[in-house]
Amino acid sequence: MKRNVFFYCFVVCAAVVFDSCSDEETYADMRKKEDAAINAYLSDYNVKVISEDTFAAQGYTTDVSKNEYVLFDSNGIYLQIIRQGCGEKIRQGETVDILCRFSEYNLLGDSLQLSNDNLYYSSIPEKMTVTNNSGTFSGSFDTESSLMYAAYSSASVPSGWLYPLTYLNIGRPVNDDDETAKISVIVPSSQGQYYASANVYPCLYVITYERGM
């Protein structure tokens, strides 16, 4: 798919991003605003934050009925596992194609910023190629069809999309009760896409993951 198909999305996205910070702000000021935006979301949506120890004790699950998110202290990511998914985890040394539906919300502006989870993109899932390197994941978007690439001009998959893969089964539904993996994840700027990192704002993503053919 040609990049000009996504031009409108790119313009809207860029306008939101560049409106979110001022040239007169210091990096420390922007970090404070980012932290405040995350804390406001946690408070406004009654998020119950659990520790990594509690997460492990629960079998690496989060209780969606209690709106639980686990906070990973090493990177500031908050993760809610809505569905662990069918199939199996990505094995060490394995490289797989993953198809995603996602919505990206800018928590600083409290707005939907980018999404392919709609009728227009119903036949065009986000495709990324991911490798498990001894428990650390790396990945790149398919530049021919990627909405994320078109919007942010980077094929690198944000760490905030990859980190949850440790806890998810990435398969393809076969039986009626099979479901794709689904998460909600709060991603600080340091773990986010290029514009979020450059302009210091956090994003909330809702993402589904399905193994490609």
Image (cartoon, rainbow, N blue to C red):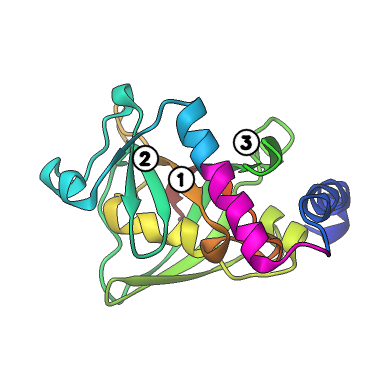
Q: Which mark is drawn over residue 50?
A: none
- Tell me which corner region of the image, top left, top right, bottom left or bottom right, holds residue 183: top left
SS at mark 3 in the image: loop
**Residue 195, position in %: x, y?**
71, 62
Q: CA distance from mark 1 to mark 3?
A: 16 Å
Q: Residue at x 62, y 42 (%)?
A: 107
SS at mark 2 in the image: strand
Is 110 located above or below residue 126 in the figure?
above
Q: Nearer the viewer, residue 200 or 179?
A: 200
Q: Residue at x 52, y 35 (%)?
A: 41
Q: Is residue 70 visible?
A: yes
> Residue type at mark 3?
Asp
> Residue type at mark 2?
Gln
In the rendered view, does 57 fall on the left or right side of 211? left
Q: Earlier in the sequence, mark 2 or mark 3?
A: 2
Reading the image, the residue beneath label 3 is 117
Reading the image, the residue beneath label 2 is 80
The question of residue 32 being in magenta is answered with: yes
Q: Earlier in the sequence, mark 1 or mark 3?
A: 3
> Residue type at mark 1?
Val
Q: Is residue 173 visible?
A: no
Label 3: few (<14), some (14–19) or many (≥20) C-alpha neighbours in 10 Å = some
In the rendered view, does 125 fall on the left or right side of 169? right
Q: In the rendered structure, are the residues bearing label 2 and label 1 in contact, judged by CB atoms less than 8 Å apart?
A: yes
- The span shown in magenta is 24-38
SS at mark 1 in the image: strand
* Nearest-to-viewer mark from 1 and 3: 1
Reading the image, the residue beneath label 1 is 185
Q: CA distance from mark 2 to mark 3?
A: 19 Å
